[in-house]
Image (cartoon, grey):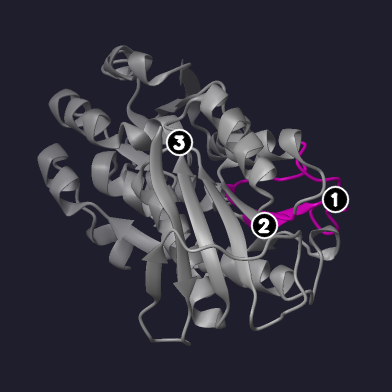
């Protein structure tokens, strides 16, 4: 388990670098009254290390730095291990943290299994209600709220058609144990059906299966689609090498995956999602709002970005200039 020691961050306002010192201690308690003398204890549980989740972490810390609050951030990375998720979640509860930031669905599920009292803010989760994390996305009703990374799946499939007009059969690559990936794949399949494209699923249950499954796609499909998926994202560089060698173009769920394995995407911004989650956490810590009453937030559609991987496109002989129109 990758662990970053507990630190105290004293935010001095937007645009000012945070000052921090190891081993500082503060008061504990669930929620806050906004007392300027209080040091808030925040547990950060990240499912695994890859660029999108790292960006969600960075955005969250930036929002806390800008808030003016004094806080300790105990950052833990579970390396995609379920038992580690449970252990860290229990640790945070035992430490009496004021708030937990859960990055990705399995992290949030582990935290909710450990506490129904400590406020929890999630990020990099596609559909909170469908994943059983909240009663309703508009009114969560429990101790958890957060930001959603729901993808513009229909638009991504339309982008695939635009860039790859000769593609007729699309392979859906995702991890079978990630519920949010399953949801997005179902949306992608519906979009393919509407567009007259056939499709086929290629699933992995762990990172150990990625190479063999992706290699099995070569020659069977004209193009691949992969949603925001933690297992696939962590293996993006490896998949990219196979894609180049096998001349298999991928349209994927977000920017960082695209730069590792894809040709293009219409992407959300995980740093922005993390920043939004951090702003929600600040409101909770200051006692201005409660997770039960805070609707799940999504990034504004006008902030979506067209991302091109020109190196991959060149290697595969694909012209991305059609996206400039």
- The quadrant of the rendering that contains the C terminus is bottom left
The span from disc 3 to disc 1 (Cα, nearest Å) is 26 Å
Task: Give coordinates of residue 206: x percent, y percent.
Answer: 43, 18
Q: Residues within 10 Å of mark 1 (few under 14, many from 20)?
A: many
Q: Is residue 114 above or below residue 28?
A: above
- The quadrant of the rendering that contains the N terminus is top left
Give the extent of the magenta segment: 119-147
Residue nearer the viewer, 135 or 88: 88
Task: Give coordinates of residue 194: x percent, y percent.
Answer: 60, 38
Residue nearer the viewer, 102 or 33: 33
Q: Residues within 10 Å of mark 2 (few under 14, many from 20)?
A: many
Which numbered tag is attached to residue 99? 2
Which numbered tag is attached to residue 272? none
Magenta highlight on residue 125: yes
Residue at horizontal 53%, vertical 39%?
195
Tell how many labels.
3
Q: Are marks 3 and 1 in contact (CB under 8 Å)?
A: no
- N-term-proximal mark, 2 vs 3: 2
Q: Label 2, secondary structure: give it.
A: strand
Q: Label 3, secondary structure: give it.
A: helix
Label 1, on which residue?
142
Task: Give coordinates of residue 160: x percent, y percent.
Answer: 39, 44
Left/right placement of residue 114 relative to residue 242 reads right
Task: Give coordinates of residue 271: x percent, y percent.
Answer: 44, 63
- N-term-proximal mark, 3 vs 1: 1
Label 3, on which residue?
230
Residue at horizontal 56%, vertical 80%?
67
The span from disc 2 to disc 3 (Cα, nearest Å) is 24 Å
Q: Nearer the viewer, mark 1 or mark 2?
A: 2
């Amino acid at each position: 388990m990758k662990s970053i020691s507990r630190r105290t961050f004293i935010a001095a306002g937007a645009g000012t670098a945070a000052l921090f010192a190891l081993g500082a201690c503060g008061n504990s308690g669930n929620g806050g009254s906004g007392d300027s003398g209080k040091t808030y204890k925040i547990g950060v549980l990240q499912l695994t290390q890859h660029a999108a989740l790292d960006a969600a972490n960075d955005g969250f810390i930036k929002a806390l730095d800008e808030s003016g609050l004094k806080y300790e951030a105990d950052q833990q990375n579970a390396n995609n291990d379920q038992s580690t998720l449970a252990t860290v979640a229990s640790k945070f509860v035992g430490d009496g943290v004021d708030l937990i930031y859960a990055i990705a669905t399995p992290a949030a599920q582990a935290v909710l299994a450990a506490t129904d009292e400590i406020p929890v803010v999630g990020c990099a989760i596609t559909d909170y209600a469908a994943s059983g994390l909240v009663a309703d996305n508009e009114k969560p009703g429990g101790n958890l709220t957060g930001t959603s990374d729901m993808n513009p799946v229909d638009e991504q499939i339309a982008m695939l058609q635009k860039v790859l007009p000769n593609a007729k059969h699309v392979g859906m690559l995702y991890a079978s144990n990630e519920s949010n990936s399953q949801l997005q794949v179902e949306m992608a399949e519906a979009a393919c059906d509407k567009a007259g494209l056939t499709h086929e699923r290629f699933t992995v249950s762990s990172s150990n299966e990625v190479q063999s499954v992706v290699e099995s796609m070569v020659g069977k499909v004209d193009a691949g689609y992969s949603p925001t998926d933690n297992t696939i994202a962590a293996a993006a560089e490896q998949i990219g090498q196979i894609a180049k060698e096998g001349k298999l173009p991928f349209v994927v769920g977000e920017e960082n995956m695209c730069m590792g394995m894809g040709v293009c995407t219409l992407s959300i911004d995980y740093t922005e999602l993390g920043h939004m989650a951090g702003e929600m956490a600040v409101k909770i810590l200051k006692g201005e709002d409660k997770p039960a009453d805070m609707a799940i937030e999504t990034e504004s559609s006008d902030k979506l970005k067209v991302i091109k991987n020109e190196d991959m496109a060149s290697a595969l002989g694909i012209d991305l200039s059609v996206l400039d129109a």
